[in-house]
Image (spheres, rainbow, N blue to C red):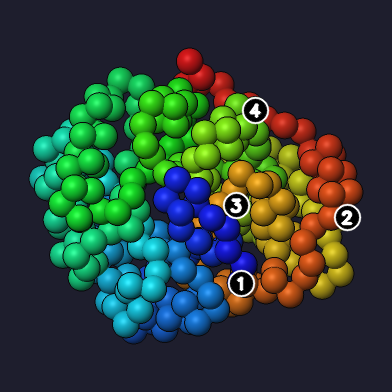
Amino acid sequence: MKYRVLKRANLKVSEIGFGCMSLGENHAENTSLLQAAYSAGINYYDTADIYQNGFNEETVGRAIKPFRKEVILATKAGNEPKSTGQGWDWNPSKSYILKAVDKSLHRLQTDYIDLYQLHGGTIEDNWQDVIEAFEILKGQGKILHYGISSIRPNVIRRYATKTAIVSDMLQYSLLDRRAEERMLPLLQEMEVGVFVRGALAKGKLVNKDLSNYLNYSPQSIEYVRNKVDSFSIEKMTRSQFALRWILKSPTVTSIVLGIRKMSQLEDAVGIFNYPEMTDETYEKISASIPLNFYVDHRE
């Protein structure tokens, strides 16, 4: 495993992080998988209060308890469950965040959260309210650092330039390169860490069906797959090549992969059996795949 520095927090983060949303509903199986990830050197674990209506935080808390202080535990807030138990409403208010954190701490069986993230965000939000809540929680020792999880350029720009966020989690892959236009350069300039989600485009870059994804046609997805195959190193899987391409970016802190099976974990950490992607390969494949751009939330 290799590590990169989350600069604003001065934390060393594993290049592969564990996206816990994909975990199943069996505590024993989840514990086995999460502890295997820890043994493989993964030190970043990302969940959210709404995943499986709180079960996800609970199962993660149980699994990492033996090594809690040795890892970076991240969760998210801002979505308030409906009273019916079905779905949730967007609520980034100070009062809600201050209540939500205590529930997360209880489910995670910990007295602090390393990285607390706003789970989304719109340009209409009272962002000062959000930051005030985060700063209160830092002062109380309930969280150590805070960030956002957003793909909206206008939201990212506001938080990166006006607040002390340490990170943003955004969508980025060979199939979805929208962040390259403005967001990655800005985040690098501001020394805000980037946690990448959707690195395999929900499996479309690997071997799942070719149904529509992000307005891409099956032909477009197949085109990118074929490009990966044409450049890939012998024996390296498609997913490993796609991850290596993302890690070539100096702006990226960690790729947060949704891992549900041991085979997926083994494939992910297997990238370190291969050398880093060369500049030549990176430039060739990047030039061969068309860029796409954000249409909404630009200003």
Q: Secondary structure at mark 2?
A: helix
Q: Secondary structure at mark 1?
A: loop
Find disc 1 in the rendering and name its residue: 1
Crowding at dot 3, Cα within 10 Å, few <14 / some 14-19 / many 20+, comes out as: many
Between discs 3 and 4, the one toward the N terminus: 4
Residue at x 42% of width, y 76% of height: 34
* Three-letter residue code for mark 1: Met
Find disc 3 in the rendering and name its residue: 199
Q: Is residue 70 left or right of residue 17?
A: left
* Three-letter residue code for mark 3: Ala
Residue 33 in view, yes or no: no
Find disc 4 in the rendering and name its residue: 181
CB atoms of marks 2 and 4 within 8 Å = no
CB atoms of marks 3 and 1 within 8 Å = no
Which one is in front in this view, the residue at disc 3 or the one at disc 4? 4
Between discs 3 and 1, the one toward the N terminus: 1
Find disc 2 in the rendering and name its residue: 230
Q: Is residue 295 above or below residue 150?
A: above
* Three-letter residue code for mark 2: Ser
Residue at x 56% of width, y 21% of height: 295
Crowding at dot 2, Cα within 10 Å, few <14 / some 14-19 / many 20+, comes out as: few
Q: Secondary structure at mark 3?
A: loop
Residue 71 in view, yes or no: yes
In which quadrant will I find the N terminus?
bottom right
Q: CA distance from mark 1 to mark 4?
A: 30 Å
Q: Secondary structure at mark 4?
A: loop
Between discs 2 and 3, the one toward the N terminus: 3
Q: Is residue 37 above or below residue 101?
A: below
Near-viewer residue (101 or 201): 101
